[in-house]
Image (cartoon, rainbow, N blue to C red):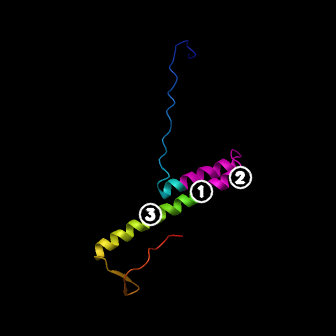
Amino acid sequence: MNMDGEIVEAPSRKKKLRRNPLGSQSGIIAEMTRLYRRVKAGKLDADEGRARVWMLERIGLRLEALALEKIEAQLERLGGGRVIYDGHEIDNRPAIEAH
């Protein structure tokens, strides 16, 4: 009810969608930033925040590795299987791991 005695509907409380899911580096950075702010405001224990940021870093590393695998596959398709590294053709090279 407002000050004039009229009945007013309460605004709906829709759940806010996250713009940056954890499936992207920008999403991981956004989540780390959110955690930092919560720790700084005293809403989250520093040790808990540190553990969560560590997990997010690990997810980020896996995303990076997946991106590198996709790039590597595209390069192999474009190069017809020939891989040139530092001016030399490489055969049967082991897969490159990120971190």
Q: Residue at x 50, y 39 (%)?
A: 16
Q: Nearer the viewer, mark 2 or mark 3?
A: 3
Label 2, on which residue? 46
Mark 1 closeness class: few <14, some 14–19, many ≥20 residues within 10 Å: few
Decide which of tag 2 and tag 3 comes sooner along the chain. 2
User: For residue 52: magenta?
Assistant: yes
Provide the secondary structure element on which disc 2 rests.
Answer: helix
**Alpha carbons under labels 1 and 2: distance apart:** 14 Å
- Which label was assigned to residue 55? 1
Quadrant that contains the C terminus: bottom right
Dominant secondary-structure state across the stretch colored magenta: helix
In primary-sequence order, the first of circles 1 and 3 is 1
Give the class, few, some or many, for how many residues have Cα within 10 Å of label 2's Cα (few <14, many ≥20): some
Mark number, residue 66: 3
Per the image, label 1 sits on a secondary structure element best described as: helix
Residue projecting furthest to the bottom = 88
Percent x, y of residue 57: 57, 60
Q: The residue under label 1 is which amino acid type?
A: Met
Q: How many marks?
A: 3
Q: Is residue 82 left or right of residue 95?
A: left
Q: Is residue 60 magenta?
A: no
Q: Is residue 51 above or below residue 4?
A: below
Q: Residue at x 33, y 69 (%)?
A: 74
Horizontal and vertical percent for residue 10? 52, 23
Q: Which residues are magenta?
A: 29-53
Q: For the point 51% across and 18% down, which residue is it? A: 8
